[in-house]
Image (tube, rainbow, N blue to C red):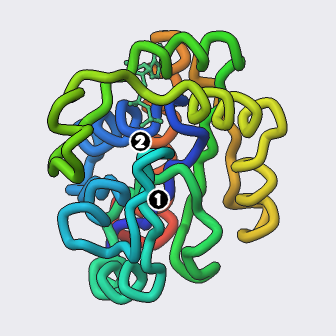
Amino acid sequence: MSSPVIIITGTPGTGKSTHAQLVANESPVPLRHINVGDLVKEKGLFEDYDEEWQSYTVDEDKLLDELEPIIAEGGVILDWHTCEIFPERWPDLVVVLRCEHSQLWDRLEKRPVFTATIHSLHEFTHPHRSYPLKKIQENNEAEIMQVVLEEARASYPPEIVVELKSESTEDLEANVTRIVDWIQAWRKERGFES
Ligand SMILES: Nc1ncnc2c1ncn2[C@@H]1O[C@H](COP(=O)(O)OP(=O)(O)O)[C@@H](O)[C@H]1O
């Protein structure tokens, strides 16, 4: 494998997709950005859709089967709000983004609900309702309790798990530079770059 597998994780709203896109753009080698939530929806890798929570119950076996051959090729950024289902051998780096909780609350309040598919009459008649309040609360609590960070630490070796603050544009730029530098160093160590 000439390119690494990177997981970018964190509570929804911490900036995973923004980071993943920028890293993919600035990476010295092509990296495929996979927004796992979108993949689950596109490929129907779920058992169920909970309308009240506006969330999918992911079929983990199907998801892992779908991802396995992609991961085997390397050069992937997995972008998802959870990471523990991915086998320990998959990632070379696990980035956990963190954001102060009141700022996270503001970001989630502004978040529109993206509905690629209309799942119910209610969704059809209320297409612009915002992100559900209880989901904002749940995510906010999860960020305070650092659930995703604990999960990453419990699932992968400590030396590959990196916690990064994502509260400002300066943080974003510094994080992207750091990850791109890490990719270069990873390739150099393996003789892919001089
Ligand atoms: N470091 C940051 N500083 C300021 N705003 C940010 C930062 N990271 C993300 N955002 C903003 O927060 C919102 C959520 O970001 P997004 O990348 O969609 O998060 P996630 O993929 O984790 O749900 C977006 O409006 C994005 O522009």
Disc 1 residue type?
Ile
Pointer 2 local density, CA inside 10 Å: few below 14, some 14–19, many at least 20: many
- How many numbered callouts? 2
Q: Which mark is residue 180?
A: 2
Quarter of the rendering containing residue 167: top right
Is residue 102 left or right of 132 when viewed as pictured? right
Local secondary structure at mark 1: strand
- Whether residue 104 is visible, yes or no, is yes
Quarter of the rendering containing residue 29: bottom left
Residues at circles 2 and 1 in contact by the CB criterion of under 8 Å: no
> Residue at the location (31% across, 66% down)?
40
In the picture of the structure, the residue carrying the numbered disc 1 is: 6
Where is residue 143? Give x, y as percent. Answer: 72, 34
Q: Quadrant of the C terminus?
A: bottom left
Local secondary structure at mark 2: helix
Disc 2 residue type?
Val
